[in-house]
Amino acid sequence: MQSKAKLYTIIEQQEQQEQQEQQGGVAMNRYGGFRNFGLKRKALGIFLLFIILPTFGVGVIVQHQFNEALQDQFISSTRRNLDTVTSQLAEQTKMVEDIADYMILNPDMRAFLQPYPVLTPAQLENRKRNIEGFLTFQLISKSYIRSIVINGYNGNNILMGEPFSGSEQSWIRQAEARRGGIVWSTGYPLHSDWAGETQLISLFRIINSYDEITRPLGRLIVRMDEASMVKLLDNGIFKDGGSVWLVNDQGHTVLSAGQPLPERFTADPAFVDILTAGVDDQVTFPVLGKQDYLSFSRTIDTATGWHIVALIPQSKVNEGFQGIKWMMTLILGAILLLSLSALIGFHFTIIRPILELKRETNRVSRGDFHASVVIRSRDEIAELGRKFNEMVITIRELIDYKYRLELRQRESELKLLQEQVDPHFLYNTLDMIRWTARLEKAERSSQLIEMLSRFFRNGMTSKSYRSTLEQELELVRSYLYLQQHRLGGRLQYSLYTEAGLEQQLMLKATIQPLVENVIKHGLNRRQNVNQIAVRCYRAEAEIHIDVIDNGKGMTPGRLAEVQQLLDGHGDEQQRRGALCNIHDRLSIFFGTPYGLKVISSSQEGTWLRIVLPGESTNRMGGEYNATEYGS
């Protein structure tokens, strides 16, 4: 009853604490703000404010910066490509111009083109062979040169490379007007005897006399392959879109590559200004108000007067980055999804177990000791739930043990009242019968009556429910002695006790009912000798009392039923048997780890074991002296 009163006191204290917390919560609702939110709302707010929104904001900023970085990288890459193309075209055209300059300064060329003095055939052939050797080397070493033609006004001509036919008079007239200056053509077609129709870009120059620089001696034509130059320009632009072309100082297109441009595009004044000014920078240029282009311009520092101009549609650039943008968007979405998954995981792994623990704690505070937390993991919160479950089970067991012990005591008192017999009358009667048997010289009957008297004296004289192992074994020995004389040679028994265990604390009538249960239910009628052995010994921190027989044992079904009853399963009506009674009394008095166990049971016999603590203490921790259980 004291335990029950303490329990009620604890519950009242918990209720008072809850009321104080509720009152404090009302006060905090006025001033607390976010602190008064539940775990779910707090977790959602924390994830929203500190994870999801910052992640989304940072992702948007990073994507914007990344797009700008990609744009700058693309522009830088395009500039480098155009610089490379410009350098290569400048190198090619400069090499061709150097050839033209060399022709003017070459003594063989001057002699070959001079109208006087007239060269002998041998001299003319020698001069021509020298010139052709030089030109052959240039054709072989420079694959972009298709042919070189020298037409002297004195009738001497040289043709090296592919033979072409077609009109070039407009370029020749421009060269004559320049009077020795270099004229570069735009792209134009000629017919090649080797390759058919061919697009060419050529250098035209009038070769004047070295002594009289105003007197023309002939003309030089160096024809270059337009396809190789177009291929070179293609390397300087965006592969999936855009246009690049060469324009001269007059704004005429020398050649173009890439995508065709809209009609009337060159008529836009702003773009013409960019070309003529030679702007070396990136600008956004609206084409007829419909589409934006990235415009790049490079100037070739040679006598060509050419400019390399590239236009790349902004939409094509964006399409080129679309895959990367989608990847960035996917990464951002994955981060948000992971954040949401983290929130869900945080809810299921931390918040929900805490809320369940709170709910079950409230049940306990209301007096419901069947509360239990579901364990789903092995982390610290799960360990807290396990400890809570163990605490509730311990409280429930304490209450059950206390109530059951009080009930058993009251039942025992009622039985004693109902079955009370005057022990002095019984003992005196048995002594009278024993002495009468001795006077009649019935020694055997006298001995049996004496053992019966001892049996009743040991079992009924003491009103205490405590006993010692020595007293219990004496009761068992008296009982087995009587049964052996009843069964004759069919029963054999042995009692063994380890030294020092005689005064071990016991509960009264714990071993004898087990032996009696063997006599009543476990004897094997088919065996000649039934053996019963009682062994008492120490086993580490425990004391074991084994009751072993070679009887018929229990069936598997009955063994399973007994095991369930000893484990605490089954209703109260099923638990009224001797085995359950002994187990319950021992576990109530000494604690749940102790009691009765069935070690084995088969057709070869049954092995029961009583497990007691090594120290003579009950489960509440109080020790008993020998004088207490020696009565």
Image (cartoon, rainbow, N blue to C red):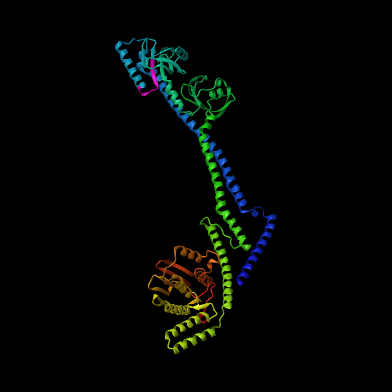
Q: Residue 398 in magenta?
A: no
Front-most of residues 399 and 385: 399
Residue 480: quadrant of the picture: bottom left
In the displayed orientation, state which residue is furthest to the left.
122
Judge whether residue 206 can be spotted in this image: no
**Region in magenta:** 140-149
Q: Residue at x 58, y 61 (%)?
A: 370
Q: Observer-nearest residue: 28 or 253?
A: 28
The quadrant of the picture occupied by the N terminus is: bottom right
Please identify the quarter of the rendering in which residue 529 is found: bottom left
Q: Residue at x 58, y 25 (%)?
A: 290
Percent position of residue 193, x then y:
37, 14
Residue 467: image x %, image y %?
50, 78
Picture layout, residue 421 above or below residue 590 = below
Asked whether residue 323 is in view, the answer is yes
Residue 116 lies, in percent from the top left, at: 36, 10
Q: Which residue is rendered at x = 57% and y = 47% of the image?
A: 51
Q: Total label count? A: 0
Q: Which of 200 and 383 lies nearest the eye of the viewer?
A: 383
Outermost residue on the front side: it is 440
Residue 498 position within the rendered picture, expressed as x and y whole percent measured from the top left:
42, 77
Q: Is residue 308 above or below residue 64?
A: above
Q: Quadrant of residue 181?
A: top left
